[in-house]
Image (tube, coloured by chain):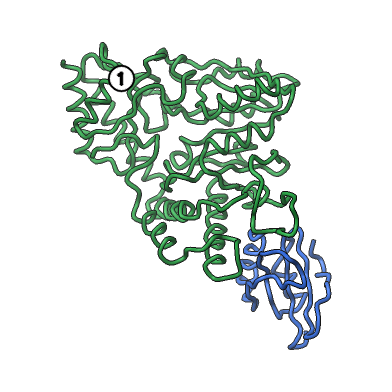
Chain colours: A blue, B green
Protein backbone atom coordinates (compact mmCIF):
# COMPACT_ATOMS: atom_id res chain seq x y z
CA UNK A 1 0.00 0.00 0.00
CA UNK A 2 1.47 3.39 -0.97
CA UNK A 3 2.60 5.53 1.96
CA UNK A 4 -0.04 8.17 1.32
CA UNK A 5 -2.95 5.69 1.29
CA UNK A 6 -4.79 5.17 4.55
CA UNK A 7 -7.68 2.91 5.55
CA UNK A 8 -10.61 4.20 7.57
CA UNK A 9 -12.65 1.43 9.19
CA UNK A 10 -16.18 2.37 10.19
CA UNK A 11 -18.32 0.25 12.53
CA UNK A 12 -21.90 0.39 13.71
CA UNK A 13 -21.07 0.74 17.43
CA UNK A 14 -18.22 2.02 19.60
CA UNK A 15 -18.15 -1.51 21.04
CA UNK A 16 -17.15 -2.86 17.63
CA UNK A 17 -14.57 -0.10 17.15
CA UNK A 18 -12.91 -1.14 20.40
CA UNK A 19 -13.24 -4.82 19.58
CA UNK A 20 -11.37 -4.10 16.34
CA UNK A 21 -8.81 -2.00 18.21
CA UNK A 22 -8.19 -4.89 20.61
CA UNK A 23 -7.71 -7.36 17.77
CA UNK A 24 -5.38 -5.08 15.79
CA UNK A 25 -3.34 -4.21 18.87
CA UNK A 26 -3.04 -7.91 19.59
CA UNK A 27 -1.55 -8.29 16.11
CA UNK A 28 0.73 -5.27 16.61
CA UNK A 29 -0.93 -3.56 13.63
CA UNK A 30 -0.29 0.17 13.51
CA UNK A 31 -3.61 1.97 13.97
CA UNK A 32 -5.34 4.83 15.73
CA UNK A 33 -8.87 5.51 16.98
CA UNK A 34 -9.94 8.82 15.41
CA UNK A 35 -13.17 10.78 14.86
CA UNK A 36 -15.09 9.62 11.78
CA UNK A 37 -14.21 11.96 8.84
CA UNK A 38 -17.21 14.18 8.16
CA UNK A 39 -17.18 13.34 4.45
CA UNK A 40 -17.73 9.64 5.29
CA UNK A 41 -20.46 10.07 7.83
CA UNK A 42 -22.19 12.77 9.82
CA UNK A 43 -21.98 10.41 12.79
CA UNK A 44 -20.49 11.81 15.98
CA UNK A 45 -18.55 8.60 16.65
CA UNK A 46 -15.07 7.31 16.10
CA UNK A 47 -13.44 4.92 13.65
CA UNK A 48 -10.09 3.24 13.11
CA UNK A 49 -7.40 4.74 10.90
CA UNK A 50 -4.62 2.47 9.72
CA UNK A 51 -2.01 2.44 7.00
CA UNK A 52 -1.79 -1.36 7.09
CA UNK A 53 -2.75 -3.34 3.98
CA UNK A 54 -6.23 -4.83 3.46
CA UNK A 55 -4.80 -8.31 3.86
CA UNK A 56 -3.19 -7.50 7.20
CA UNK A 57 -6.33 -5.79 8.47
CA UNK A 58 -8.58 -8.69 7.51
CA UNK A 59 -6.27 -11.27 9.01
CA UNK A 60 -6.52 -9.69 12.45
CA UNK A 61 -10.02 -8.21 12.38
CA UNK A 62 -11.86 -11.42 11.57
CA UNK A 63 -15.59 -11.01 11.15
CA UNK A 64 -17.23 -7.90 12.54
CA UNK A 65 -20.75 -7.23 11.27
CA UNK A 66 -21.43 -3.89 9.64
CA UNK A 67 -17.78 -3.05 8.99
CA UNK A 68 -17.25 -0.52 6.19
CA UNK A 69 -13.81 0.28 4.85
CA UNK A 70 -12.70 3.44 3.02
CA UNK A 71 -9.35 4.24 1.48
CA UNK A 72 -8.01 7.78 1.49
CA UNK A 73 -5.45 8.28 -1.29
CA UNK A 74 -4.45 11.86 -0.50
CA UNK A 75 -7.18 13.44 -2.58
CA UNK A 76 -10.40 11.68 -1.63
CA UNK A 77 -12.10 8.62 -0.11
CA UNK A 78 -13.33 5.57 -1.94
CA UNK A 79 -15.09 2.58 -0.42
CA UNK A 80 -13.02 -0.55 -0.38
CA UNK A 81 -14.10 -4.16 0.09
CA UNK A 82 -11.99 -5.96 2.63
CA UNK A 83 -11.50 -9.50 1.29
CA UNK A 84 -13.36 -12.00 3.48
CA UNK A 85 -14.83 -9.39 5.83
CA UNK A 86 -18.59 -9.17 6.46
CA UNK B 1 -21.34 -0.07 62.34
CA UNK B 2 -21.79 -3.81 62.02
CA UNK B 3 -23.24 -4.52 58.62
CA UNK B 4 -25.35 -7.63 57.96
CA UNK B 5 -27.29 -6.53 54.88
CA UNK B 6 -25.05 -7.71 52.06
CA UNK B 7 -28.04 -9.23 50.24
CA UNK B 8 -29.26 -5.66 49.71
CA UNK B 9 -25.84 -4.35 48.74
CA UNK B 10 -22.35 -5.40 49.75
CA UNK B 11 -20.56 -3.17 52.23
CA UNK B 12 -17.85 -2.15 52.66
CA UNK B 13 -16.49 -2.26 49.12
CA UNK B 14 -13.00 -3.60 48.43
CA UNK B 15 -10.13 -1.19 47.91
CA UNK B 16 -10.06 -2.16 44.22
CA UNK B 17 -13.62 -0.87 43.76
CA UNK B 18 -12.96 2.43 45.51
CA UNK B 19 -9.71 3.01 43.62
CA UNK B 20 -11.29 2.23 40.27
CA UNK B 21 -14.22 4.62 40.81
CA UNK B 22 -11.88 7.32 42.09
CA UNK B 23 -9.57 6.92 39.11
CA UNK B 24 -12.49 7.35 36.74
CA UNK B 25 -13.79 10.41 38.58
CA UNK B 26 -10.40 12.10 38.83
CA UNK B 27 -8.53 10.96 35.72
CA UNK B 28 -10.67 9.35 32.99
CA UNK B 29 -13.77 11.42 33.26
CA UNK B 30 -15.32 11.37 29.76
CA UNK B 31 -18.70 10.27 28.45
CA UNK B 32 -18.12 6.93 26.65
CA UNK B 33 -18.71 6.90 22.91
CA UNK B 34 -19.71 10.55 22.90
CA UNK B 35 -16.71 12.11 21.23
CA UNK B 36 -13.38 11.66 19.52
CA UNK B 37 -11.36 13.09 22.40
CA UNK B 38 -9.20 11.04 24.74
CA UNK B 39 -11.44 11.18 27.87
CA UNK B 40 -14.41 9.89 25.87
CA UNK B 41 -12.43 7.15 24.12
CA UNK B 42 -10.76 6.09 27.37
CA UNK B 43 -14.17 5.92 29.08
CA UNK B 44 -15.44 3.79 26.17
CA UNK B 45 -12.43 1.49 26.57
CA UNK B 46 -13.27 1.10 30.25
CA UNK B 47 -16.88 0.15 29.41
CA UNK B 48 -15.65 -2.26 26.72
CA UNK B 49 -13.23 -3.90 29.14
CA UNK B 50 -15.92 -4.29 31.80
CA UNK B 51 -18.34 -5.77 29.26
CA UNK B 52 -15.76 -8.29 28.08
CA UNK B 53 -14.75 -9.25 31.63
CA UNK B 54 -18.33 -9.67 32.81
CA UNK B 55 -19.26 -11.72 29.73
CA UNK B 56 -16.32 -14.04 30.41
CA UNK B 57 -17.37 -14.24 34.09
CA UNK B 58 -20.68 -15.85 33.08
CA UNK B 59 -19.11 -17.74 30.16
CA UNK B 60 -21.11 -15.77 27.60
CA UNK B 61 -20.04 -15.88 23.98
CA UNK B 62 -20.62 -12.40 22.59
CA UNK B 63 -19.84 -9.43 24.80
CA UNK B 64 -22.08 -7.12 22.75
CA UNK B 65 -25.00 -9.19 24.06
CA UNK B 66 -24.16 -8.16 27.63
CA UNK B 67 -26.21 -5.02 28.20
CA UNK B 68 -25.62 -2.62 31.08
CA UNK B 69 -28.72 -1.40 32.89
CA UNK B 70 -29.43 0.67 35.96
CA UNK B 71 -30.03 -2.37 38.20
CA UNK B 72 -31.33 -5.92 38.28
CA UNK B 73 -34.90 -4.65 38.26
CA UNK B 74 -34.39 -2.80 34.98
CA UNK B 75 -32.84 -5.93 33.49
CA UNK B 76 -35.90 -7.99 34.48
CA UNK B 77 -38.22 -5.28 33.18
CA UNK B 78 -36.42 -5.35 29.83
CA UNK B 79 -36.79 -9.12 29.66
CA UNK B 80 -40.45 -9.22 30.71
CA UNK B 81 -41.80 -6.10 29.00
CA UNK B 82 -39.62 -6.63 25.94
CA UNK B 83 -40.34 -10.28 25.32
CA UNK B 84 -43.90 -11.00 26.45
CA UNK B 85 -46.78 -10.08 24.18
CA UNK B 86 -50.52 -10.40 23.97
CA UNK B 87 -51.81 -13.85 24.82
CA UNK B 88 -48.46 -15.27 25.91
CA UNK B 89 -48.22 -17.69 28.80
CA UNK B 90 -45.39 -17.39 31.32
CA UNK B 91 -44.42 -19.66 34.19
CA UNK B 92 -42.69 -18.38 37.29
CA UNK B 93 -42.17 -19.40 40.92
CA UNK B 94 -43.33 -18.50 44.41
CA UNK B 95 -39.81 -17.36 45.31
CA UNK B 96 -39.85 -14.35 43.01
CA UNK B 97 -38.99 -10.82 44.01
CA UNK B 98 -41.35 -7.98 43.09
CA UNK B 99 -38.88 -7.04 40.36
CA UNK B 100 -40.43 -10.02 38.55
CA UNK B 101 -43.94 -10.08 40.00
CA UNK B 102 -44.76 -6.41 39.37
CA UNK B 103 -43.80 -6.30 35.68
CA UNK B 104 -45.64 -9.64 35.31
CA UNK B 105 -48.70 -8.10 36.96
CA UNK B 106 -48.44 -5.22 34.48
CA UNK B 107 -48.28 -7.44 31.38
CA UNK B 108 -51.06 -9.63 32.78
CA UNK B 109 -53.35 -6.61 33.07
CA UNK B 110 -52.32 -4.75 29.91
CA UNK B 111 -51.37 -7.51 27.47
CA UNK B 112 -53.48 -10.38 28.79
CA UNK B 113 -50.38 -12.40 29.52
CA UNK B 114 -51.31 -15.51 31.49
CA UNK B 115 -49.07 -16.04 34.52
CA UNK B 116 -48.69 -19.41 36.27
CA UNK B 117 -46.91 -19.39 39.64
CA UNK B 118 -45.36 -22.71 40.66
CA UNK B 119 -45.30 -23.49 44.37
CA UNK B 120 -42.18 -23.87 46.47
CA UNK B 121 -41.63 -25.67 49.74
CA UNK B 122 -41.21 -23.82 53.02
CA UNK B 123 -37.50 -24.30 52.47
CA UNK B 124 -37.73 -22.47 49.17
CA UNK B 125 -37.20 -25.47 46.89
CA UNK B 126 -39.09 -25.49 43.64
CA UNK B 127 -41.49 -28.33 42.88
CA UNK B 128 -39.94 -29.53 39.62
CA UNK B 129 -42.84 -31.83 38.77
CA UNK B 130 -45.27 -28.91 39.17
CA UNK B 131 -42.97 -26.78 37.03
CA UNK B 132 -42.95 -29.36 34.28
CA UNK B 133 -46.74 -29.66 34.46
CA UNK B 134 -47.19 -25.89 34.32
CA UNK B 135 -45.32 -25.58 31.01
CA UNK B 136 -47.55 -25.94 27.98
CA UNK B 137 -47.33 -25.46 24.23
CA UNK B 138 -48.32 -21.82 24.57
CA UNK B 139 -45.68 -21.07 27.24
CA UNK B 140 -43.44 -18.29 25.97
CA UNK B 141 -41.00 -18.14 28.89
CA UNK B 142 -40.10 -19.52 32.30
CA UNK B 143 -38.77 -17.03 34.85
CA UNK B 144 -36.74 -18.44 37.72
CA UNK B 145 -35.37 -16.80 40.84
CA UNK B 146 -31.96 -18.47 40.95
CA UNK B 147 -31.30 -17.70 44.61
CA UNK B 148 -33.90 -16.57 47.12
CA UNK B 149 -33.27 -13.16 48.66
CA UNK B 150 -35.05 -14.21 51.85
CA UNK B 151 -33.97 -17.83 52.36
CA UNK B 152 -30.69 -18.21 50.49
CA UNK B 153 -31.95 -21.30 48.69
CA UNK B 154 -30.52 -21.85 45.19
CA UNK B 155 -32.58 -23.54 42.47
CA UNK B 156 -30.97 -26.29 40.35
CA UNK B 157 -30.84 -24.71 36.89
CA UNK B 158 -29.72 -27.89 35.13
CA UNK B 159 -32.79 -29.79 36.37
CA UNK B 160 -35.02 -26.82 35.61
CA UNK B 161 -33.70 -26.72 32.04
CA UNK B 162 -34.55 -30.42 31.69
CA UNK B 163 -38.05 -29.83 33.12
CA UNK B 164 -38.94 -26.99 30.75
CA UNK B 165 -37.33 -28.50 27.67
CA UNK B 166 -36.58 -25.82 25.06
CA UNK B 167 -38.67 -23.01 26.53
CA UNK B 168 -37.11 -19.58 26.96
CA UNK B 169 -35.38 -19.53 30.37
CA UNK B 170 -35.08 -16.15 32.08
CA UNK B 171 -33.01 -16.23 35.26
CA UNK B 172 -32.93 -13.65 38.04
CA UNK B 173 -29.40 -14.01 39.37
CA UNK B 174 -29.27 -10.89 41.54
CA UNK B 175 -28.41 -12.89 44.66
CA UNK B 176 -26.32 -15.62 43.09
CA UNK B 177 -23.91 -13.88 40.75
CA UNK B 178 -20.57 -13.57 42.55
CA UNK B 179 -21.74 -16.00 45.21
CA UNK B 180 -21.76 -19.14 43.09
CA UNK B 181 -20.38 -19.75 39.58
CA UNK B 182 -22.83 -19.14 36.72
CA UNK B 183 -22.29 -20.56 33.24
CA UNK B 184 -24.96 -19.37 30.83
CA UNK B 185 -24.03 -21.92 28.18
CA UNK B 186 -23.70 -24.96 30.41
CA UNK B 187 -26.90 -24.15 32.30
CA UNK B 188 -28.90 -23.32 29.19
CA UNK B 189 -29.78 -19.79 30.30
CA UNK B 190 -31.37 -17.68 27.57
CA UNK B 191 -31.61 -14.44 29.51
CA UNK B 192 -29.59 -13.68 32.63
CA UNK B 193 -30.55 -10.64 34.73
CA UNK B 194 -28.54 -9.35 37.68
CA UNK B 195 -27.30 -6.39 39.66
CA UNK B 196 -23.61 -5.53 39.97
CA UNK B 197 -23.46 -4.00 43.46
CA UNK B 198 -24.01 -7.09 45.60
CA UNK B 199 -21.59 -10.03 45.40
CA UNK B 200 -19.81 -8.53 42.38
CA UNK B 201 -18.61 -5.74 44.70
CA UNK B 202 -19.55 -2.91 42.31
CA UNK B 203 -21.37 0.20 43.43
CA UNK B 204 -25.08 1.00 43.25
CA UNK B 205 -26.54 2.18 39.95
CA UNK B 206 -25.50 -0.73 37.74
CA UNK B 207 -27.12 -3.94 36.60
CA UNK B 208 -26.80 -6.09 33.50
CA UNK B 209 -28.68 -8.47 31.25
CA UNK B 210 -27.15 -11.11 29.00
CA UNK B 211 -29.20 -12.08 25.95
CA UNK B 212 -28.49 -15.32 24.16
CA UNK B 213 -28.15 -14.91 20.39
CA UNK B 214 -31.63 -14.89 18.88
CA UNK B 215 -33.29 -13.37 21.95
CA UNK B 216 -34.09 -9.79 20.99
CA UNK B 217 -36.52 -7.97 23.29
CA UNK B 218 -38.11 -4.65 22.36
CA UNK B 219 -36.00 -1.93 24.04
CA UNK B 220 -37.29 -0.16 27.16
CA UNK B 221 -35.51 3.07 26.28
CA UNK B 222 -34.91 4.94 23.06
CA UNK B 223 -32.50 7.81 22.47
CA UNK B 224 -28.93 8.85 21.93
CA UNK B 225 -26.27 6.17 21.74
CA UNK B 226 -23.32 8.07 20.27
CA UNK B 227 -23.69 5.97 17.12
CA UNK B 228 -25.69 6.33 13.88
CA UNK B 229 -26.42 9.88 14.93
CA UNK B 230 -27.57 10.92 11.46
CA UNK B 231 -30.62 8.65 11.87
CA UNK B 232 -33.59 9.24 14.16
CA UNK B 233 -34.46 5.57 14.35
CA UNK B 234 -33.07 3.41 17.16
CA UNK B 235 -29.93 1.46 16.15
CA UNK B 236 -30.33 -2.27 15.62
CA UNK B 237 -26.78 -3.22 16.58
CA UNK B 238 -26.04 -4.35 20.12
CA UNK B 239 -25.26 -3.18 22.72
CA UNK B 240 -26.39 0.27 21.50
CA UNK B 241 -29.95 -0.91 20.79
CA UNK B 242 -30.56 -1.24 24.55
CA UNK B 243 -28.21 1.38 25.99
CA UNK B 244 -29.65 4.77 25.17
CA UNK B 245 -28.41 7.67 27.28
CA UNK B 246 -25.22 8.18 29.22
CA UNK B 247 -24.30 4.99 31.05
CA UNK B 248 -23.34 4.80 34.74
CA UNK B 249 -19.66 4.88 33.85
CA UNK B 250 -18.41 5.45 37.43
CA UNK B 251 -20.38 2.36 38.48
CA UNK B 252 -18.95 0.41 35.54
CA UNK B 253 -15.49 1.44 36.76
CA UNK B 254 -16.50 0.17 40.19
CA UNK B 255 -17.57 -3.14 38.68
CA UNK B 256 -14.13 -3.54 37.09
CA UNK B 257 -12.61 -2.96 40.51
CA UNK B 258 -14.95 -5.54 42.01
CA UNK B 259 -13.99 -8.08 39.34
CA UNK B 260 -10.31 -7.37 40.03
CA UNK B 261 -10.95 -8.08 43.72
CA UNK B 262 -12.70 -11.36 42.89
CA UNK B 263 -9.81 -12.32 40.61
CA UNK B 264 -7.25 -11.53 43.30
CA UNK B 265 -8.95 -13.29 46.21
CA UNK B 266 -10.77 -16.01 44.30
CA UNK B 267 -14.47 -16.85 44.18
CA UNK B 268 -13.82 -19.99 46.24
CA UNK B 269 -12.12 -18.20 49.10
CA UNK B 270 -14.68 -15.40 49.13
CA UNK B 271 -17.49 -17.96 49.25
CA UNK B 272 -15.78 -19.95 52.01
CA UNK B 273 -15.43 -16.87 54.21
CA UNK B 274 -19.11 -16.03 53.77
CA UNK B 275 -20.11 -19.63 54.45
CA UNK B 276 -18.08 -19.68 57.67
CA UNK B 277 -19.74 -16.45 58.81
CA UNK B 278 -23.19 -17.89 58.04
CA UNK B 279 -22.45 -21.12 59.92
CA UNK B 280 -21.14 -19.25 62.93
CA UNK B 281 -24.27 -17.10 63.09
CA UNK B 282 -26.54 -20.14 62.68
CA UNK B 283 -24.68 -21.98 65.39
CA UNK B 284 -25.14 -19.07 67.78
CA UNK B 285 -28.82 -18.63 66.95
CA UNK B 286 -29.51 -22.34 67.47
CA UNK B 287 -28.37 -22.05 71.07
CA UNK B 288 -30.95 -19.38 71.83
CA UNK B 289 -34.50 -19.90 72.96
CA UNK B 290 -37.36 -18.14 71.16
CA UNK B 291 -35.36 -17.89 67.95
CA UNK B 292 -36.97 -19.36 64.83
CA UNK B 293 -34.75 -19.83 61.77
CA UNK B 294 -36.58 -20.45 58.48
CA UNK B 295 -35.65 -22.54 55.49
CA UNK B 296 -33.67 -25.69 54.95
CA UNK B 297 -30.43 -24.17 56.25
CA UNK B 298 -28.70 -27.54 56.54
CA UNK B 299 -29.81 -28.68 53.10
CA UNK B 300 -27.61 -28.93 49.99
CA UNK B 301 -29.33 -26.03 48.26
CA UNK B 302 -28.85 -23.44 50.99
CA UNK B 303 -25.85 -21.95 49.24
CA UNK B 304 -26.16 -18.22 49.88
CA UNK B 305 -25.05 -16.31 52.99
CA UNK B 306 -28.62 -15.42 53.92
CA UNK B 307 -30.46 -16.30 57.13
CA UNK B 308 -34.14 -15.54 57.77
CA UNK B 309 -35.20 -15.58 61.41
CA UNK B 310 -37.68 -14.24 63.91
CA UNK B 311 -37.77 -13.85 67.65
CA UNK B 312 -40.96 -15.42 68.98
CA UNK B 313 -43.36 -12.80 70.23
CA UNK B 314 -41.34 -9.87 68.90
CA UNK B 315 -42.21 -7.98 65.72
CA UNK B 316 -39.41 -8.06 63.13
CA UNK B 317 -39.46 -4.28 63.04
CA UNK B 318 -38.78 -4.18 66.78
CA UNK B 319 -35.85 -6.56 66.33
CA UNK B 320 -34.52 -4.36 63.54
CA UNK B 321 -34.92 -1.27 65.68
CA UNK B 322 -33.10 -2.83 68.62
CA UNK B 323 -30.30 -3.98 66.30
CA UNK B 324 -30.00 -0.56 64.73
CA UNK B 325 -29.71 1.06 68.15
CA UNK B 326 -26.84 -1.32 68.85
CA UNK B 327 -25.15 -0.32 65.59
CA UNK B 328 -26.15 -3.51 63.77
CA UNK B 329 -27.70 -3.39 60.31
CA UNK B 330 -30.15 -6.18 59.45
CA UNK B 331 -33.07 -6.07 57.04
CA UNK B 332 -36.58 -6.67 58.34
CA UNK B 333 -40.00 -6.98 56.73
CA UNK B 334 -41.02 -8.66 53.49
CA UNK B 335 -37.87 -7.94 51.47
CA UNK B 336 -39.96 -7.12 48.36
CA UNK B 337 -40.86 -10.82 48.14
CA UNK B 338 -44.42 -11.24 49.44
CA UNK B 339 -45.05 -14.54 47.63
CA UNK B 340 -41.88 -16.03 49.08
CA UNK B 341 -42.87 -14.97 52.58
CA UNK B 342 -46.28 -16.58 52.01
CA UNK B 343 -44.54 -19.82 51.00
CA UNK B 344 -42.35 -19.71 54.10
CA UNK B 345 -45.26 -18.81 56.36
CA UNK B 346 -43.95 -15.42 57.45
CA UNK B 347 -46.49 -13.25 55.63
CA UNK B 348 -47.56 -10.52 56.44
CA UNK B 349 -45.15 -9.66 59.26
CA UNK B 350 -42.09 -10.93 57.44
CA UNK B 351 -38.84 -11.69 59.17
CA UNK B 352 -35.35 -10.57 60.08
CA UNK B 353 -32.78 -11.19 57.37
CA UNK B 354 -29.13 -11.51 58.30
CA UNK B 355 -26.74 -11.52 55.36
CA UNK B 356 -23.04 -11.47 56.22
CA UNK B 357 -20.41 -10.65 53.63
CA UNK B 358 -16.75 -11.19 52.89
CA UNK B 359 -15.73 -8.38 55.24
CA UNK B 360 -17.91 -9.50 58.18
CA UNK B 361 -15.64 -9.89 61.19
CA UNK B 362 -15.81 -12.37 64.04
CA UNK B 363 -16.31 -9.53 66.51
CA UNK B 364 -19.28 -8.31 64.46
CA UNK B 365 -20.86 -11.75 64.67
CA UNK B 366 -20.26 -11.99 68.42
CA UNK B 367 -21.95 -8.63 68.92
CA UNK B 368 -24.88 -9.58 66.67
CA UNK B 369 -25.44 -12.77 68.67
CA UNK B 370 -25.16 -10.88 71.93
CA UNK B 371 -27.83 -8.42 70.82
CA UNK B 372 -30.12 -11.19 69.54
CA UNK B 373 -29.73 -13.03 72.83
CA UNK B 374 -30.69 -9.90 74.72
CA UNK B 375 -33.77 -9.35 72.53
CA UNK B 376 -34.85 -12.98 72.93
CA UNK B 377 -34.36 -12.83 76.70
CA UNK B 378 -36.70 -9.91 77.23
Work out which quarter of the rendered image holds the C terminus of chain B and state it: top left
Q: Nearer the viewer, residue B123 or B149?
A: B149
Query: The disc numbered 1 marks a residue on which chain?
Result: B
Q: Position of residue B84 (x, y in %)?
A: 69, 29
Above or below — where is B261 with respect to A4?
above
Q: Nearer the viewer, residue A83 or B346?
A: B346
User: Residue B173 appears at what percent x and percent y?
Assistant: 52, 36
Q: Residue at left 48%, top 15%? A: B121
Residue drawn at point x = 52 percent, y = 67 percent? B39
The residue most toward the bottom is A3
Drawn side of residue B245 relative to residue B260, left or right: right
User: Taking B104 as reference, is B230 left or right?
Assistant: right
Foreground residue among B11 and B110: B110
Residue A9 placement (x, y as % from top left): 73, 70
Q: Count of labels shown? A: 1
Percent x, y of residue B12: 32, 46
Look at mark 1 in the image and give the residue it sits on: B316
Question: Could you classify mark 1 by the number of other residues whose Cα lies within 10 Å: few (under 14), some (14-19), or many (20 or more)?
Answer: many
| Left or right placement of residue B308 versus residue B288 in this view | right
Please say if A63 is above or below B371: below
Q: Which quadrant does the N terminus of chain B fall into?
A: top left
Q: Which sits in the foreground, A54 or B76?
A: B76
Q: Quadrant of residue B320?
A: top left
> Tag 1's secondary structure?
helix
Amino acid sequence: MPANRVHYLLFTTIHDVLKAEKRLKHGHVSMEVVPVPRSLSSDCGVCIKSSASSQVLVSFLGQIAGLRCFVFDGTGYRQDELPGAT
Amino acid sequence: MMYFDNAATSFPKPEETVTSVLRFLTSTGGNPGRGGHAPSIDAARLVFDARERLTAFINGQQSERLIFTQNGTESLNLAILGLLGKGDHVVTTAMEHNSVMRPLDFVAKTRHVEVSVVACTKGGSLDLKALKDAVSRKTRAVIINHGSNILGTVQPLDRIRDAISGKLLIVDACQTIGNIPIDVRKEGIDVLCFSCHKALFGIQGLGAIYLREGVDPVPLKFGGTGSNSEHTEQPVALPDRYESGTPATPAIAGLLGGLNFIDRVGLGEIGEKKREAKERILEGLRRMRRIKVYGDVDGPHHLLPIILMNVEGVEPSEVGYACNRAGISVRVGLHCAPLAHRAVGTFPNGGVRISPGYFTGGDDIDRLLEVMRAIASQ
